[in-house]
Amino acid sequence: MAVTRGRGIYSITLEPIALRDLRNSLRLMDKETSAKVRDMAQPLSKRLAGQLMMFGMQAPAPQTKLVLQSILTPRDRMIRVDVGGTKKVGRPYGGVKNKKGVRTKQTSAVAGELLWGTEYGSHQGVDRAGRKYSNRFKARYKESGYWLAPATNYYAPIVAQEYSKGFSEIVKGLGLNGNA
């Protein structure tokens, strides 16, 4: 399993250990075979995303439901689920009042900015500039995570095993398994 972190995105890409070396081989496959692999991996990505949503609905931070709106399952040859990113979620806030007293230039929170707080919770304290901050996510800090890590640890091995079986069937269908 490879987990990529950056720019407020938690991208989960499952690479079964037995197939890690075959990633380069995937690039060499013809378009038809590559499409078969994508068709096989997409439902598994959606199932993993469903598990993330189930675990997320149980998470204590109220902002988790906003982050769940950002879950995507791009069609890939590997099992892949993207969470967070630049999608605007929640109600608009901030902005400035115009001459008529109406707020303009309001913005919503970006899912990636809420992601880590919903996963690990928060605590009260003082930042480096000496400013006090509050318990923004209403869930105490939990190093093991509330929903992303537990869901991934629980369900990733299941879909990875199914991916391995499906990929093996595709390879057997091509006669590339050495037994043909």
Image (tube, rainbow, N blue to C red):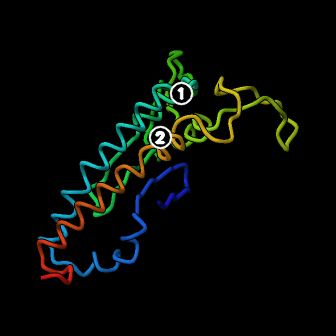
Q: Nearer the viewer, mark 1 or mark 2?
A: 2
**Quarter occupied by residue 121:** top right
Type of the residue with mark 1: Ala
For residue 70, above or below residue 74 = above
**Quarter occupied by residue 57:** top left
Query: Among all residues in the image, which is located at the extreme right?
Result: 130
Pinpoint residue 4: horizontal percent, then vertical percent.
52, 59
Image mark for residue 151: 2
Pinpoint residue 171: horizontal percent, then vertical percent.
19, 73
Q: Nearer the viewer, residue 97 or 86?
A: 86
Q: Nearer the viewer, residue 116 or 145?
A: 145
Residue drawn at x 55%, y 49% as measured from the top left: 8
Pinpoint residue 51: horizontal percent, then vertical percent.
39, 37
The residues bearing labels 1 and 2 have C-alpha atoms spaced at a distance of 11 Å
For residue 94, above or below residue 35 = above
* Neighbours of disc 1 within 10 Å: few (<14), some (14-19), many (20+): many
Residue drawn at x 55%, y 40% as measured from the top left: 115
For residue 70, above or below residue 140 = below
**Label 1 SS:** loop
Type of the residue with mark 2: Ala
Pinpoint residue 34: horizontal percent, then vertical percent.
19, 69
* Neighbours of disc 2 within 10 Å: few (<14), some (14-19), many (20+): many
Residue drawn at x 49%, y 32% as measured from the top left: 108
Q: Nearer the viewer, residue 157 or 11?
A: 157
Query: Among all residues in the image, which is located at the extreme top?
Result: 101
Q: Which residue is label 1 attached to?
A: 59
Residue drawn at x 54%, y 44% as measured from the top left: 149
| First of labels 1, 2 by sequence position | 1
